[in-house]
Image: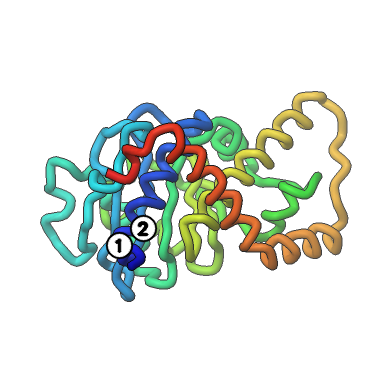
Amino acid sequence: MGLSLEAQLRVDLAATFRIIAHLGMHEAVANHFSAAVSADGKQFLLNPKWKHFSRIRASDLLLLDADDPQGMDRPDVDATAWSIHGQIHKLLPEVRVVLHLHPVYTTAVACLANPHVPPIDQNTARYFNRLAVDDLYGGMADTEAEGARLAGLLKDKKRLLMGNHGVIVTAPTIGEAFDDIWTLERACQVLVTAWSTGQPLRLLTDDVAEKTARSWEKITDFSEQHFEEMKQLMLEADPSILD
């Protein structure tokens, strides 16, 4: 008999934390990932407050309810995580997975006066006209009102480039979300490196960029397999993920 939905989500989400730590994309003991368990999205899994990504196990993940008014007051729940993830899952039930990170290159692009990812290669083209941008950073996002504002920016996009802050990626599955945030960081690494030469960028035409973005959207199986391969590497290195 296979794992229940919640049990499988726990394993996959725990593996995602390990992968991100392995890749050096984590931020100390901050940042959070969540995955919806219930059909309405309000019940979701979240990493506990200030536990290093490299140590998270399936059983460590908290099962929370966005309608529970005491959620923010729990000692094992970070207020910023509750505010951002709770509101996104509550207001956007179609979003099943939310990854919030401060990866170096994506965050660097988010800190520009004009945060954007122009299409210069296959990775950057994946995000052509597909990134929402928040330019109203006002400190720690530790209120439900701020979480609701961020959810509003995501209503017609899957990714939010958070000015002076980081990034949020949403997806219907953990595999798609992981591959997306990995590819976005890779895209920004290429972009920042190209900018650093001081030479003009050779931009793809809008037609080619749009064609490339649509091609990406047709190969979600690629994203899922990227995740499965990385998950297997983590499981072979440390099976405690399953605990």
- Residue 199 higher or lower than 174, as above or below: above
| Residue drawn 85% across the image and 47% down it | 203
| Residue drawn 62% across the image and 62% down it | 221
Residue 50: quarter of image: top left
Measuring from the top left, give residue 201's x and y in whole percent: 84, 38
Residue 165: tell me if it is visible.
no
Which residue is at the front of the view, 150 or 2?
2
In this picture, residue 70 sits left or right of residue 186: left
Please state, as top left, top right, bottom left or bottom right, where the C terminus lies in the image. Answer: top left
Please state, as top left, top right, bottom left or bottom right, where the N terminus lies in the image. Answer: bottom left
Measuring from the top left, give residue 155's x and y in whole percent: 48, 68
User: Badge 2: how crowded within 10 Å, few (<14), some, or many (20+)?
Assistant: many
Measuring from the top left, give residue 100's x and y in whole percent: 43, 46
Residue lying farthest front?
Answer: 1
Which residue is at the front of the view, 68 or 154?
68
SS of the residue under disc 1: helix
Indicate which disc residue 9 carries.
Answer: 2
- Residue 146 higher or lower than 15, as above or below: below
Indicate the amino acid at tag 2.
Leu
Indicate which disc residue 105 carries.
Answer: none
Measuring from the top left, give residue 206's x and y in whole percent: 83, 60
Indicate the amino acid at tag 1.
Glu
Q: CA distance from mark 2 to mark 1?
A: 5 Å
In this picture, residue 176 sits left or right of residue 214: left
| Residue drawn 86% across the image and 29% down it | 199
Residue 149: quarter of image: bottom left
* Whether label 2 touches label 1, CB < 8 Å: yes
Residue 93: tell me if it is visible.
yes
Find disc 1 in the rendering and name its residue: 6
